[in-house]
C-alpha cells in the first residue's frame, strides 16, 4: 500500500469517483489507500458535494507550508507523555476530528473535541485550546458553547487558578445517549396531534402514527441500553504484566437484559 501524501493525479481520481457516486471505501480500494485517508481528504476540502481536486491540492500545499513555518516557531502539539510519538499523535488527532465531522459536527467543534479527547487529563482551558489549535479565543468560546449544548463537554471551575476548564469524561457519553433518546419527543408529540387533525385511518395520519410508534420504540430501547451499559464507562480493562489489555469474559461484563422490558418493547413495535 503506497504511503506519503496524495498526488494531484490521485485527487483527480477521487473527484471522478465522487462524481460517479462511489463510496469512500471503493475509491480507496481503487487507489490502494486506506479509507480513512480518502474520508479525511474529502472532508477537509469541501465534502462530497464541494470537493475539487485542484483546490484540494493547493490547500494541502498551503497547509504544509504553514505547518513548516509554525514548526520553526514552536511545538504544534501539547506536551506528550508515555513516550508517545508527537507526529503520530497529531495525525491521529486529525483522524479523530474527521470522524467527528463525518458524524455531523462542524469543523471547529470537531477540532476542539478531538483535542480534548487526546489529552490524558481530558480537560483544557480556553487559552490552551486556542494556543494548540492556533485559533482565536472567540472561536473556542463559540465551539464550547455548541458542544456544551449537545452534552459533549462540560465546564469545570479551577478555583486555584480562577479559570474554567473544559472537560470530556465518561459520563458525557451516557448523557449524550439520553439526550439523543429525548430528541424525538417533540416530533412524537406533534405527530400524535397530527393524527387527530388529519383523521385516524387516513393515509397521512397512518404515516405519522407509524413514525410515532417506531420512534417510541427506538427511544425506549436506546434509553434502556444506555442505562444497562453505563457501568461499562467506568470499567477499566484488566491488564497483564506487560500492560496489554485482557478482555473480560462476556459473562463478567454483560448486563442481563430484562425479559419483560424486551417483550414490552417488541409488543409496542408490533402494535
Image (cartoon, grey):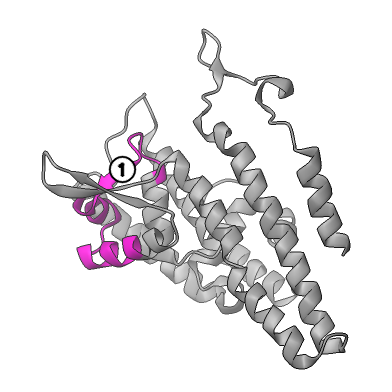
User: At x 59% / y 74%, what residue is drawn?
Assistant: 186
Q: Main secondary structure of the magenta part?
A: helix
Q: Does the image show residue 99?
A: no
Q: Is residue 2 left or right of residue 40?
A: right
Label 1: few (<14), some or many (≥20) within 10 Å? many
Q: Is residue 260 left or right of residue 178?
A: right
In this view, the residue in front, 51 or 58, is 51
List the single residue furthest toward the top. 241
**Residue 65 rendering spot, x and y as whole percentages:** 32, 60
Q: Which residue is mark 1?
A: 123
**Residue 212 rendering spot, x and y as whole percentages:** 74, 72
User: At x 86% / y 89%, what residue is drawn?
Assistant: 202
In magenta, the rendered stretch is 117-145
Q: Is residue 104 left or right of residue 91?
A: right
In this view, the residue in front, 173 or 57, is 173
Quadrant including the N terminus: top right
List the single residue furthest toward the bottom. 198
List the single residue furthest toward the left. 161
Residue 59 inside the magenta-drawn segment: no
Amino acid at each position: 500500500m503506497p504511503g506519503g501524501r496524495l498526488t494531484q493525479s490521485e485527487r483527480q481520481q477521487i473527484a471522478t469517483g465522487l462524481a460517479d457516486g462511489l463510496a469512500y471505501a471503493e475509491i480507496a480500494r481503487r487507489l490502494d489507500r486506506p479509507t480513512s485517508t480518502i474520508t479525511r481528504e474529502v472532508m477537509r476540502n469541501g465534502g462530497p458535494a464541494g470537493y475539487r481536486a485542484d483546490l484540494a491540492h493547493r490547500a494541502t500545499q498551503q497547509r504544509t507550508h504553514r505547518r513548516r513555518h509554525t514548526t520553526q516557531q514552536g511545538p504544534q502539539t501539547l506536551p506528550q507523555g508515555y513516550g508517545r510519538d508527537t507526529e503520530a499523535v497529531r495525525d491521529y488527532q486529525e483522524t479523530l476530528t474527521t470522524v467527528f465531522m463525518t458524524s455531523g459536527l462542524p469543523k471547529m467543534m470537531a477540532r476542539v473535541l478531538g483535542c480534548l479527547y487526546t489529552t490524558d487529563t481530558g480537560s483544557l482551558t480556553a487559552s490552551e485550546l486556542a494556543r494548540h489549535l492556533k485559533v482565536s479565543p472567540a472561536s473556542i468560546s463559540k465551539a464550547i458553547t455548541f458542544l456544551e449544548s449537545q452534552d459533549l463537554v462540560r465546564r469545570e471551575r479551577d478555583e486555584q487558578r480562577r479559570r474554567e476548564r473544559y472537560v470530556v469524561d465518561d459520563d458525557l457519553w451516557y448523557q449524550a445517549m439520553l439526550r439523543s433518546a429525548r430528541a424525538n419527543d417533540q416530533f412524537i408529540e406533534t405527530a400524535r396531534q397530527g393524527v387527530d387533525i388529519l383523521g385516524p385511518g387516513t393515509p397521512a395520519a397512518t404515516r405519522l402514527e407509524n413514525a410515532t410508534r417506531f420512534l417510541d420504540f427506538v427511544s425506549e430501547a436506546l434509553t434502556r441500553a444506555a442505562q444497562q451499559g453505563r457501568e461499562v464507562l467506568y470499567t477499566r480493562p484488566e491488564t497483564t504484566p506487560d500492560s496489554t489489555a485482557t478482555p473480560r469474559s462476556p459473562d463478567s461484563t454483560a448486563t442481563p437484559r430484562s425479559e419483560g422490558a424486551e417483550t414490552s418493547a417488541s409488543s409496542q413495535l408490533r402494535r
